[in-house]
Amino acid sequence: MPNDIRPIAIAAIAAAMAAAAPVGARADDDGVLKIGAPLALTGGLADEGKKQQDVWNLWLDKVKEAGGISVGGEMLPVEFVEYDYQTEGNRAGQLAEKLITDDGVDVLMAPFGSGHTKIVSAVAERYQVPLIACVSSSEAVFDQGFDYLFGTLAPNAGVVDSITAYLKDKMPELKSIAIYGRDDVFPKSMAASAQAAAEAAGIEVVYNELYSVGTMDHAAAISAIKAADPDWIYMTGYTQDLILGRKQMADLDAEAPAITMITGPAYREFTDGLGPLANGVSSATWWHHATNFTDGVGVWPTTQDFYKDFLDRFGSDPDYVHASCAAAAEALVSAVTEAGSTDKAAVRDALAKTDIMTFYGPIKFGENGMNQAREMPIIQVQDEAIKVLYPPVIANAELELIE
């Protein structure tokens, strides 16, 4: 490991330990819950990595206000140790190992995305350190037979099934779809799920191709999509891919009544980057602040408690990345409290039994470690603002077709 690696941020310890521990066994010999996180703070996923860092800092401040977390009869402080892996997957794995062997973390938080999570999960499993993934939803990551991997996002298939059923209901004339996805773990999985969902719904797949990571020109593919004349264009990738793709669709006059980009509109950067061109683009997401979960465990009992704190701190709406990563921290604290210790095996066992309500919604890990499927919000950009189309209980708009 290079000698110049330094933590880019070690969050403030949430509460000082009492001078004398109460009678009984101490929760942990170190007297602290130490969480390690390899983060993409530079490189192509820097925006996403910063979201994870921001919301964990917000969460830590709330923990500090509460005096720490109650574990085994004492208030335990919490510490985050973070390294920038520069959006390089192999480096993420190396830094995960450093966090375990050099920094002695009790648990790991996974980086952004299914691909990098898969790399880090192999390290965590080898050392038998619990790993909580808050931005990984690809079943391929969780189908490795690992015992120490858990994820707060529901499976990809639920997201695609939801929006396919919704569009089929709202668009009786929907007969064909063009699918265009990034050749990377998460987007590729979402493209495959779209094909399966479309075929199951009787929608003809008239185009289905993947583009390479780093593609800077989608003109050839978009021209082929235009020639196929689909009723529904479905593109997967990361934010900058989707912004470029939408701009080139407009340049080439490749339009369809429905355009879905997974998960572009879920991010403020998508709408900011496209302006009026974002209008009409739909997506599905794992969470939206319009939900109204109450009686949650942890520092935010309700969705609105979390939303208010986030808005006060950052001046913008949180997205599902912020919410899922904050909820991952809450799930961890619940498990450590249940275990009465930061012992890795005990925490792992407690995570496997997790069945809690949070501001983010229910968290109950299945046999493969993934959070259980639930209704996924469907959203659309209208007048450069995010509107919720589904489920009905939080919907504030109707679907608008692109003319």
Image (cartoon, helix red, strand yellow):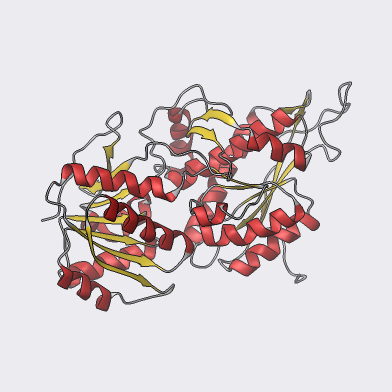
Number of marks in the rendered image:
0
Q: Residue at x 28, y 55 (%)?
A: 199
Q: Residue at x 54, y 50 (%)?
A: 52
Judge by depth and name the residue closer to the eye, 268 or 112: 112
Q: Quadrant of the N terminus?
A: bottom right
The answer to whether any part of residue 68 appears in the image is: no
Q: Is residue 33 left or right of residue 307?
A: right
Q: Quadrant of the image for the C terminus?
A: bottom left
The image quadrant that residue 242 belongs to is bottom left
Rendered position, 81 above or below 70:
below
**Residue at horizontal 30%, vertical 34%?**
391
Where is residue 351 drawn, in percent x and y? 65, 37
Q: Position of residue 47 (x, y in %)?
A: 47, 58
Q: Classify residue 346 as left or right of residue 137.
A: right
Q: Is residue 133 left or right of residue 305?
A: right
**Residue for point 53% across, 34% down:** 363
* Between 231 and 268, the one nearer to me in the picture: 231
Q: Give the answer, above or below, for where 247 lies relative to 62.
A: below
Instruction: Please name whichever residue, 81 or 26, is drawn nearer the observer in this view of the structure.
Output: 26
Query: Front-most of 178 and 33?
Result: 178
Q: Percent position (x, y) of residue 240?
A: 38, 65
Residue 288 placement (x, y as % from top left)? 38, 39
Q: Is residue 173 visible in this depiction of the protein?
A: yes
Q: What is the quadrant of residue 210 in the picture? A: bottom left
